């Protein structure tokens, strides 16, 4: 059981002098980790910049941090950065949301009907194994070189893996827990709602983390293939006019977006899986 | 005691069908449990005890024979029967209170009413103050107690106990046997306990039914009459002079001395 943190006497939640020392050591280590993390980044940027300035590498090919920073400022001042970021984020979130929701719904239907599951099994396995990027041209011919085609690609990339992993989690729901609710007279829908779905929540949250990354890949590749907006478009455009700073800048922003989205899903995890909170 | 029949099984048989063939789990089994009785079933492992409980709880239908509850047949899980399994099977994503409410919730009682009932039971069985804890914060004994409350909350007349103490350490087991016995007596429930533990069966029961190996058939029935000075509990039962001889007879029925595992 938890010991109530005494406030004041030893400070910062410590219950004794020894505990306070222990907590100080923990905090110190935490600070060290963060400092070294920052140092790694700073050293990397400094080496890059120095190498480019001293012409050890060709900045035309590798770009350089100052040029990227300058590019970033220009893009922001032109107001185009926000536009391209928004397009990519919208495509990713729609692909993620629809792909995940549809995947969970289909997994639920497969759990409901063993027959349906047996019938569709080979199709889902094959579709999952198919490289979804290869579907890109098909979506573009069907839906035009539009945002819809990009979103379709983003959906397709997360859909099948969601179906497979969530369906398998549904099936792994403890049979004895099902006996418990059945003994209370639970209907099939109640079995799903009370046992099967909650049991799968940790898997679903893990799937969300994977899917947000996959959807971003789908959106970027979709923009590579056919788009006139978004960070993927910006990268291809930079490549075509051989502006490495533009390519690198887009990449940096992309990395930040990916990080923020992943972090958001992790926050959601703590919200949805409170019983696993450490 | 010795009231009307609560559970009556007549010529019960059950066969499991799989791709590789069929397994006869029960064969022509007859069984009666009377109102207010605490009855135990002991038998060698894999003799079909759990199948029998599944039949009584309406989760399975007998292949042959009839199962009557209060004189009428059974077509599915029934509100008169509550089960308690070996593992507590608390839902780790629900708090203790939410776990205790589960049965009422499924049976469609209003949330407020279910909450009051579950809360009251938790209070009276020593779990007050743990309502908002999650199961992983509780000890094994406390968890099984919550599972019992979850079952009691729906107010069943008959409790089916499928080795509910076998996963607990010895001391916790004795304490929980005592508590469950008291709770069942106080609430005038009928209980059917399936167990491997002969001493547990004798110490808790009014009657012990000994089954033979698969397919299960009744080998012997004992009416347990123990001389105890003050109020019979599983603890005082163990001190009764007749206790050992009952255990020994059952021991012999099960042929433990000569059987191999």
Image: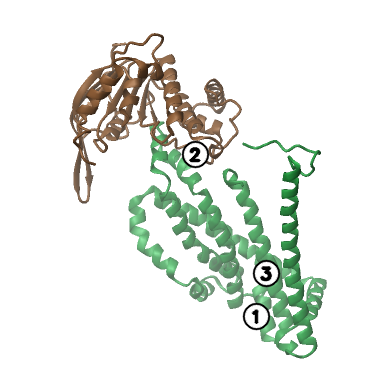
Residues A73 and B194: in front is B194
**B185 up-or-down from A198: above or below:** above
Nearest to the eye among marks 3 and 2: give it: 2
Quarter of the image with the N terminus of chain A in it: top right
What residue sits right under mark 1 in the picture?
A236
x, y percent for residue A169: 45, 52
- Percent across and percent down for residue A45 are 76, 77
State the residue at coordinates (39%, 40%). A176
- CA distance separating discs 3 and 1: 16 Å
Residue A152 % position (x, y): 54, 66
User: Does label 3 or label 1 sit earlier along the sequence?
Assistant: 1
Q: Which residue corresponds to mark 2?
A: B91
- Between residue B12 and residue A88, name the one nearer to us: B12
Q: Residues within 10 Å of mark 2 (few under 14, many from 20)?
A: many
Could you say whether the residue bearing mark 3 is in a helix, strand or loop? helix
Task: Say whether residue A50 is left or right of residue B48.
Answer: right
Q: Are marks 3 and 1 in contact (CB under 8 Å)?
A: no
Q: Are marks 3 and 1 on the same chain?
A: yes
Which residue position holds label 3?
Answer: A255
Q: Identify whether A128 is placed above or below A242.
A: above
User: Is the Cβ of the residue at disc 3 closer than 8 Å to that at disc 2?
Assistant: no
Q: Badge 3: how crowded within 10 Å, few (<14), some, or many (20+)? A: few
Visible residue check, residue B10 = no
In the figure, the shade used to draw chain A is green
Going 40% across and 52% down the picture, which residue do you hit?
A110
Chain on which label 2 sits: B
Q: Chain of mark 1?
A: A
Which type of secondary structure does the marked residue at label 2 adopt? Answer: loop
Within the image, what quadrant is residue A246 found in?
bottom right
What residue is at 58 percent from the left and 59 percent from the top?
A209
């Amino acid at each position: 059981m938890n010991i109530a943190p005494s406030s004041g006497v030893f400070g910062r939640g410590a219950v004794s002098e020894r505990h306070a020392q222990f907590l100080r050591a923990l905090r110190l280590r935490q600070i060290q980790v963060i400092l070294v993390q920052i140092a790694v980044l700073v050293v990397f940027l400094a080496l890059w910049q120095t190498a480019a300035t001293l012409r050890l590498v060709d900045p035309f090919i590798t770009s350089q941090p100052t040029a990227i920073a300058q590019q970033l400022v220009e893009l922001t001042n032109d107001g185009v950065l926000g536009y391209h970021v928004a397009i990519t984020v919208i495509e990713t979130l729609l692909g993620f949301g629809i792909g995940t929701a549809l995947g969970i719904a289909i997994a639920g239907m497969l759990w409901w009907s063993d027959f349906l599951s047996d019938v569709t099994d080979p199709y889902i396995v094959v579709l999952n194994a198919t490289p979804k990027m290869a579907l890109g041209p098909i979506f573009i011919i069907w839906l035009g070189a539009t945002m819809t085609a990009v979103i379709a690609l983003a959906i397709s990339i997360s859909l099948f893996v969601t179906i497979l992993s969530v369906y398998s989690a549904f099936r792994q729901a403890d049979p004895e827990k099902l006996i418990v609710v059945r003994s209370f007279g639970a209907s099939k829908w109640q079995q799903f709602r009370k046992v099967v779905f909650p049991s799968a929540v940790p898997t679903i949250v893990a799937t969300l983390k994977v899917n947000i990354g996959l959807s971003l890949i789908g959106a970027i590749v979709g923009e590579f293939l056919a788009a006139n907006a978004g960070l993927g478009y910006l990268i291809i455009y930079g490549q075509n006019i051989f502006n490495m700073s533009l390519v690198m800048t887009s990449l940096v922003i992309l990395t930040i977006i990916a990080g923020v989205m992943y972090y958001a899903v992790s926050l959601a995890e703590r919200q949805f899986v409170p019983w696993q909170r450490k | 005691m010795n009231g009307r029949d609560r559970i009556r099984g007549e010529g019960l048989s059950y066969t499991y069908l799989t791709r590789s063939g069929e397994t006869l789990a029960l064969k022509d089994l007859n069984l009666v449990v009377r109102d207010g009785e605490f009855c135990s079933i002991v038998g060698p492992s894999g003799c079909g005890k759990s199948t029998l409980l599944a039949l009584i709880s309406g989760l399975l239908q007998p292949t042959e024979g009839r199962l009557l509850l209060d004189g009428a047949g059974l077509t599915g899980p029934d509100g008169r029967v509550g089960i308690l399994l070996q593992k507590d099977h608390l839902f780790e994503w629900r708090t203790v209170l939410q776990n205790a409410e589960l049965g009422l919730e499924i049976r469609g009682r209003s949330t407020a009413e279910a909450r009051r009932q579950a809360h009251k039971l938790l209070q009276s069985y020593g779990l007050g103050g743990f309502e908002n804890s999650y199961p992983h914060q509780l000890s094994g004994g406390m968890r099984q107690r919550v599972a019992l409350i979850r079952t009691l909350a729906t107010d069943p007349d008959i409790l089916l106990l499928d080795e509910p103490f076998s996963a607990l350490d010895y001391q916790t087991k004795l304490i929980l046997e005592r508590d469950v016995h008291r709770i069942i007596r106080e609430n005038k429930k009928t209980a059917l306990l399936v167990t491997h533990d002969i001493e547990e069966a004798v110490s808790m029961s009014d009657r012990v039914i000994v089954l033979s190996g698969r397919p299960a058939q009744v080998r012997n029935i004992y009416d347990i009459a123990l001389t105890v000075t003050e109020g019979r509990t599983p603890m005082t039962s163990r001190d009764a002079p007749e206790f050992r001889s009952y255990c020994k007879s059952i021991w012999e029925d099960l042929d433990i001395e000569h059987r191999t595992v």
